[in-house]
Image (cartoon, rainbow, N blue to C red):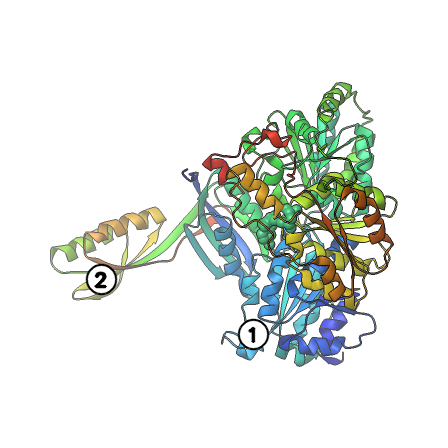
Amino acid sequence: MTEMSGADMVVQALVDLGVDTVFGYPGGAVLPIYDTLFKHPTIKHILVRHEQAATHAAEGYARSTGKPGVVLVTSGPGATNAVTGITDALLDSIPMVVLTGQVPTTLIGTDAFQECDTVGITRHCTKHNYLVMDPDRLGPILHEAFYIATHGRPGPVVIDIPKNVQVATGTYSIPNRIDHKSYRPQVDPDADAIAAAVAMIAASERPIFYTGGGVINAGPDASAALRQLVALTGAPVTSTLMGLGAFPADDDKWLGMLGMHGTYEANMAMNRADLIIAVGARFDDRVTGRLDAFSPNSKKIHIDIDRSSINKIVPVDLAVVGDAGRALDALIAAWADKGHKARDLGEWWRRIDGWRATRCLDFPEKKEDGAEIMPQRAVKALFDATRGMDPIITTEVGQHQMWAAQHFHFDSPNRWLTSGGLGTMGYGFPAAVGAQIAHPDRLVICIAGEASLQMNIQEMGTVAQYRLPVKIFILNNQWMGMVRQWQELTYESRYSNSYSDSLPDFVKLADAYGWTGLRIDTLGELADGIQTMINTPGPVIVDCRVAQLANCFPMIPSGAAHTDMILQPNDIVGTMDDEAKALV
Amino acid sequence: MKIRTEAGERHVLAVTVDNEAGILAKITGLFSARGYNIESLTVADISADHALSRITIVTSGPPAVIDQIIAQLDRLVPVHSVTDLADGGAHVEREIALVKVAGSGDKRIEALRMADVFRAKVVDTTLSSFIFEITGTSDKVDRFIALMRECGLVEVGRTGVVAIARGSEAL
Ligand SMILES: Cc1ncc(C[n+]2csc(CCOP(=O)(O)OP(=O)(O)O)c2C)c(N)n1
Ligand SMILES: [Mg+2]
């Protein structure tokens, strides 16, 4: 075996692991690796403008391709800037490997220049992390890190590499097979549990599938299996924010998203069901609402790859630990095996149709050309205009995110990229960059809020540098709308610090970065504006001015039950008791 | 508004882990981050090649929380196994304390007499002090220390609990 430098080993391992793209930002402690990457024939390095953006771009890359995202940053501030995206990836189970530079081993612990305890800081926001003290360990650790990031419940892994370990030479080795000593996630579901699950589904009169990001993580085949199982059983489907796209929104079994800003029919069906089949979803508080009122009369089956998700929040009747796709396949096989036929769920569907009749996503609006644009209308128009173009949609965080989730519809997985668990403002734009890098010819649109966008707006430079045709569609309500909405609901409209003051002129900003900028002010300009955005080659920012004070409904106020949804603005009381105020 | 907490029962968990840097921080950090109790925690490597450590954790919580603690520990990459010793039936628990008592006269005699009752050993003595070594369940150690407070207790060091299941089976 030939000796090579640690930096060369890192890059060799990336090549061997099939990595084609690295999102990063250089600095003293990673210069050796950057030197190896200089004019590298196969690995493309995308230079971001802030390390947080590198992590979100890697997430966007990962979520839109199913492959792990790779990040390279320097020690100290490079690593700390990456922490938000690492945590975001942990909460949304996104496979990601982050390489951080570290001060030389001889200086660790001395408060050296740009030293920080990266392994300590990231210990609880990674699935696993490493500090590599010996170049010979680089090969095995990199390979193991990719295995851990992508197997079981995916997540971020940090590898902290001191500078002298990058410079020193050693032998590069690849473990023949990653058979981890202790980390062996269960992927194949238990056959007895599957048999029990099928019997429960077949016996149910009011079943509902409640699916989540785990179905997306399990790959496109899992989404296909979900469709098949739903067709076999005839049961309705709802999904979390993270699971949108696993089931086609135009299917008549689709009830829309559930939870705080979910549809009335999805939440009512969850509440009245006699069986919930949770697949790759984790009963998050945004989904359950008030726990003691959550689906009180149902039996619950929970399929999840992470045993710690089971019984964490809601006690379930049957646990199926395993990969969502394999579990769905096993359910389909067992259903056929037992010769089950879809039950007559007519009565259940009649009740669901009753809830659907509230048309909970309708919103009041004026229709004349000069009218202000309702944000929901803007999302609907965007959806209509891009039909058939199979766009990838990312969002920032806030009202616009929820409106996008409600009014933009997906037929397939990996098209919807949003920060669910951490709710990170500043995610959407860099995630769009990552998705566009992975899919250079696809239409990638970030639906943004004017406040969130400013959290990583510097990435306009990255987009210009790599000539990415990313489109940003701002639902500009000139408010941190979601904050304002809560203040309206909870604090008698005392709008403390939620106004988006001193906004830049986004059109001029576009100009400054060499983008195309355009502004849409009235309903009459909406359709044309969107067409111009789509037809303009290269990056476009659209400042779409929308009604400033629109609120996002339906809504389950914090601490309320699924059955206590606020459907329309005039249901708002404006105050809340302390118990409810204390909930996020 | 008042913040509520739930009471629960005591459990002893035996956790085998890779003996690697930062593992203890990972385990204790998990407890603090998720708001679980640690009443006692001991750790030492247990394999001939020093590759594995055994951590004994005494914690308390309602059954659902204990289940969560076990599941959360189990999914950490360097964790090999987690066993709730209460689950497996009978187990043996021991703790060692070194207890320094200073004084003279009756108190000194009383201290020695009680040490004898508790089967504590004298491991150091001066004309005005003893150091006792006591081994037993935490409860017994607690009771001994409480009595020694009346007899001139000046310092205590305790190891925390180690525990192992009865019978011939390994974890
Ligand atoms: C990094 C971060 N800081 C703060 C918040 C809290 N927060 C949630 S939504 C929101 C306002 C978002 O405003 P905007 O991007 O304009 O979206 P809108 O709600 O108006 O659509 C804030 C401050 C957050 N989610 N993320
Ligand atoms: Mg806004």
The answer to which image quadrant residue A117 occupies is: bottom right
Q: Tell me which residue sits at (74%, 43%) in the image.
A: A215
Amino acid type shown at disc 1: Gln
View extreme (top): residue: A347
Residue A311 position in % (x across, y down)? 59, 38
Asked if badges 1 and 2 are on one and the same chain, I answer: no
Residue B130's tag is 2
Looking at the picture, does residue A493 appear above or below residue A112?
Answer: above
View extreme (front): residue: A370
> As rendered, which of A19 and A265 lies closer to the eye?
A265
Determine which residue is flagged by label 1. Answer: A114
Of labels 1 and 2, the one closer to you: 1
Residue A147 position in % (x across, y down)? 71, 59
> Cβ(mark 1) to ligand 1 < 8 Å?
no
Say whether residue A121 is visible.
yes
> As rendered, which of B111 and A183 lies closer to the eye?
A183
